[in-house]
Amino acid sequence: MCDYSLESVTSRPATVTDRLVTSRFPGTVTRGFSSAKDPFVAVCLKAGTGIAFDQEPKYERPGVFWPHKVTATSKMARFRQTDRDIPTVHHDALEFSDGTIVLVTKLVSGQLATVLQLPKEEQETAKAKPIKLETQTS
């Protein structure tokens, strides 16, 4: 899924082994992932997608007077969305193995990553009625 702020940008869904780059998209106030081959096309991730950065990713954290750059503790992250009940904020985020959650729009531009795994699709069996086990009483 792509953040609401990228609705005006051409986009496509992510696939396994996609090479991504963190990008600032022209005409928007946000950053996101684009294809390393086509930086003007946003690559949208579904919740649960696993990615690996080439190096520990850097992101901006608010500072007293201006943001400062922080380095994540891991190259591996899982895509998720936050604050979905608030329509006018950025939702796209990465969760790192130490539990740190970073909004994608806070990632420093120009960092390379690879899509490792897409989330499992919902199983049809989850929609089936649960089986009630009968117990014998004497």
Image: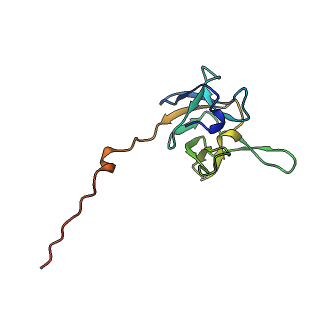
Quarter of the image for residue 42 reads top right
**Left or right placement of residue 46 versus residue 56 in this view:** left
Q: Is the N terminus in the top left, top right, bottom left or bottom right quadrant? A: top right
> In front: 13, or 128?
128
**Left or right placement of residue 42 versus residue 31 in this view:** left
Residue at the extreme bottom: 138
* Image x and y of residue 112, in percent: 63, 30
Colouring scheme applied when the structure was drawn = rainbow
Name which residue lies at 28% across and 57% down.
130
Quarter of the image for residue 67 reads top right
* Image x and y of residue 43, in percent: 57, 30
> In front: 75, or 65?
65
Quarter of the image for residue 124 reads top left
Q: Is the C terminus in the top left, top right, bottom left or bottom right quadrant? A: bottom left
> In front: 132, or 101?
132
Name which residue lies at 23% across and 63% down.
132
* Image x and y of residue 129, in percent: 27, 54
Name which residue lies at 63% across and 27% down.
9
* Image x and y of residue 53, in percent: 60, 35
